[in-house]
Amino acid sequence: MANKKRVRVEYVWLDGNEPLPKLRSKTRYMDFSDPISDETINTLSDWNFDGGSTNQGSLENSDRRLRSIRPYEDPFHEDGMLVLCEVDYHSGVPHETNSRTHLSSLVDDHPGILVGFEQEFTLVNPANNEPLGFLLSPTEQGQYYCGAGCMNVIGRFVVDEFEKACLKAGIELDGINAEVMPGQWEFQTKAQDPCKAADDLWVARYILERISEIKPVIVSYDPKPHADFNGAGCHTNLSTDSTREEFTEIHQDKLMNALEADHMQYVKVCGEGSERRLTGECETSDIKVFSSGVGDRGVSVRIPEKVSRERAGYFEDRRPGANIDPYRVLYSLISSVIKSGLL
């Protein structure tokens, strides 16, 4: 008979905060057969929590269920696990705040989509609530992008720890860099299944929040943390089986027409305060007008130069702000792509 091993499991979920859910977690210890296999991890039992304390219930009706959907290695505790969960009622019905369940159903019906995110964030000084980079007294922003040295970059001590923790957790990053605004950074996730991409983004945010507890700094996803500098986005790169095979100007026109038709509805899920960021300045498009172009970083949707030359690949949606719920953004974006016929 296999030996039993006591394992620390951190259940992570999204609460009912609006407009952007907050990350919550709680710990339980569970006995697993040793050695632990993927099959064992994926049979984690459900767990209940107090929805009345997370804007997902009331005092009289507070019990909600955590249903594990994706396991990760816990980078903070040896041999531990992080488990991302969906929130359901105990009847099995998804809770109203469970935006993942809608995306999952949509993706199941339309396979072949790959998504990658470019998540920007700003490190904020808790002593004065200003961007940490303003310790450099910046007057313009050109020298900080992908910079090095103490007068060009602030926050690497946080980002290095974040990178190590993500890799340990099994989150596949495509890259990390300092951004145009001092104290602002970006990480890119691997192009993959939409639900996996969004799950990894949320867990990466959770890891970043945990690291910020001990540094200490505030991680801000404000889309416009300072009026005179670039805002913070979460550019969303998407391709389909069809676009990876052939993405000519004719196909691009079909896609852009579908995206333009849904533009005003779509920007409603692109993050609270998007109107402060999407002004037509600081490498953005005007929130009121849909635009597209090849190699242009001042448009709503960019076709990379390489994709245009090769007539195959992906497009970059530059409208989403740093503070998006990726499940909602992808549900809306993929719905528009479906209308274009490029799936």
Image (tube, grey):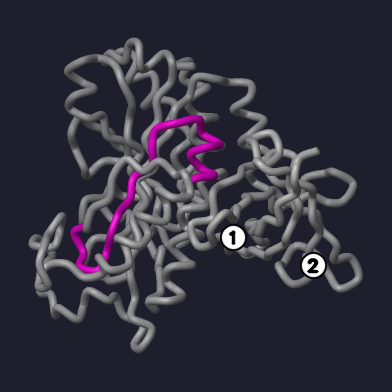
Looking at marks 1 and 2 on the same chain, the residue that comes earlier in the sequence is marked by 1
Give x and y (percent) for residue 282: 21, 56
Q: Is residue 335 above or below residue 162?
A: above
Confirm whether the magenta stretch covers residue 65. Answer: no
Give the residue pinned by disc 1.
Answer: 21
**Residue bearing mark 2:** 50
Residue toward you, 172 or 319: 172
78 sits to left or right of 223: right
In this picture, residue 180 sits left or right of residue 109: left
Per the image, is 192 magenta? yes
Q: Hey, what amino acid is under mark 1?
A: Pro
- At horizontal 15% and vertical 55% (from top left) the residue drawn is 146
In three-dimensional space, the C-alpha distance between marks 1 and 2, rounded to whole angstroms, equals: 16 Å
Question: Which segment did they paint magenta?
Answer: 179-200
Q: Residues within 10 Å of mark 2 (few under 14, many from 20)?
A: some
- The answer to whether residue 67 of the structure is visible from this angle is no
Contact between labelled residues 2 and 1, with CB atoms less than 8 Å apart: no
At mark 1, the secondary structure is loop
**Residue 330 or 277: which is nearer the viewer?**
330
Q: If the image is split into quadrants, where does the N terminus sit?
A: top right
